Image (spheres, rainbow, N blue to C red):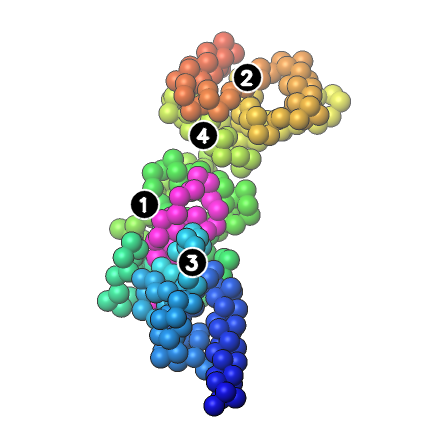
Amino acid sequence: MRRDLSIFHAVTHARMTDVLKLAGQHHGLVRAELLRPLGIDRSALARLTASGVLEPTAGPGIRRVAGGEPSPHQRLLGSVWAGGPHAVASHQGGAWLWRLDPIETLNLDVSVPYSTGRRPPGVTLHYSTALGRGLVTCVDGIPVTEPTLTLLDLGSVVSPDVLERAFDSALRQGLTSQRRAEVILRRLGRSGRNGTAALRALLEARSVADGVTDTDFEVRLIQVLRRGGLPEPVRQLPLYDRDGFIGRFDCAYPAAMVAIEADSVRYHHDRERFEKDRERRTRAEAIGWRVPSFTWRHVTRRPQRVASAIAGMLDASGWLWRHAA
C-alpha cells in the first residue's frame, strides 16, 4: 500500500512538473489541448485545479498557474485562446504587442475569422476574413496580425494622429514600409472596410513628404505644424557645407532655409551629444540656415506658439509659403 502511494505521488509530481514547464512557455497559462499529449485529461486538469495548483480563467479549458496577478502578456494570450482556435491579437492589442508608439495601454482586441459563439468577458472581438497565410505571425508566443495589417485595423479604432505615430513607429523599427502598406491596401483595402480610409489618407499625406522621423516626438512636432496651417515639411533633411556633411535635421523648409529640431532631453542628455548638436547647429547657421528647437513641453503644451514662431520665420525668409500651404 505504501509503495502504491509513493508511485502515485511520483506520477502526480511528474505531471505537475510537466504542467508547470508547459505553463512557463505560455506566460503562465495551459489549456486542455496542450495537456492531452502529456497524458493529462480533463479529469486530471480538474484535480490540479481543485488542489490549487491551477486556477480557471475566462476561457473554457484554460488554466493559469495559481498565485500572483496575471501579466499583460498572460491576459492577452488568454484572450486569444478564449477566442477560439484561429483567433489572433489585433487592433490596439496587436499594436501593443508590436510595441508601437504611442500604444502603451493594453486593450484586449482579438480578431477571429468567423463567429464561434464565444464572447470572452472583457475582450473586444473583431471578425476578419484577412487572417490567411502571410498575414498572421507570433510575437512573444502570442498569435497576432502582421504589423501592416495591425496598422490597417488600428486605423478603425484610433484617431488619425495616433495612427500616424504608430505608423512612424513601425517604420523606425523596420516592421513595415510605405510600399508594404500600399500593397496591403490594394490587397485588403476595400470601400467600407474599417480602417481603409484612415490608412489611405495617411499614405496619401505621406507621399508628399520625404524621409522618416526618428522619434515619436518628431511626429508630434510635425502634427503641430500641420494643424497650424503650415506646409508639410521635409523630414530628416541632410545638410552640407564646404567641409562636408553637417548632419540630419528633424524637419525643414528648404525654400525658407529653416531647419527645425525636436530638442529631447532623452536624446541629448550627455555632454558629447550636446556639444555635437550645438556644433552642427552652428555650422548650419553659418551658411544661412535658421535652426529653431522646441522641447516636448513646447510641442504638447504650447503648440500654437510653436506654429506661430515657425510661420514668422517663414514670412521673414521671403518665401511665399502661404500660397504653398
Helix, strand or loop at mark 2: loop
Tag 2–tag 1 contact (CB < 8 Å): no
**Mark 1 highlights which residue?**
157
Q: Name the quarter where the C terminus is drawn.
A: top left
Instruction: Residue 202 in the image: state x and y as whole percent.
Output: 40, 40
Q: Give the residue type at disc 4.
A: Arg
Q: Is residue 302 above or below residue 96?
A: above
Tag 3–tag 1 contact (CB < 8 Å): no
In the image, 124: left or right of 175?
left
Pick whichever of labels 3 and 1 is earlier in the sequence. Answer: 3
In the image, is residue 7 part of the stretch drawn in magenta? Answer: no
Q: Give the residue type at disc 1.
A: Val
Judge by depth and name the residue closer to the eye, 120 or 203: 120
Judge by depth and name the residue closer to the eye, 260 or 145: 145
- Identify which residue is drawn at 51% across, 22% down: 295
Pick whichever of labels 3 and 4 is earlier in the sequence. Answer: 3
Instruction: Residue 289 in the image: state x and y as whole percent.
Output: 60, 16
* Whole-number angstrom distance, CA of label 3 to CA of label 1: 34 Å
Pick whichever of labels 4 and 1 is earlier in the sequence. Answer: 1
* Whole-number angstrom distance, CA of label 4 to CA of label 2: 16 Å
Range of residues picked out in magenta = 81-110
- Marker disc for residue 292: 2
Helix, strand or loop at mark 3: loop
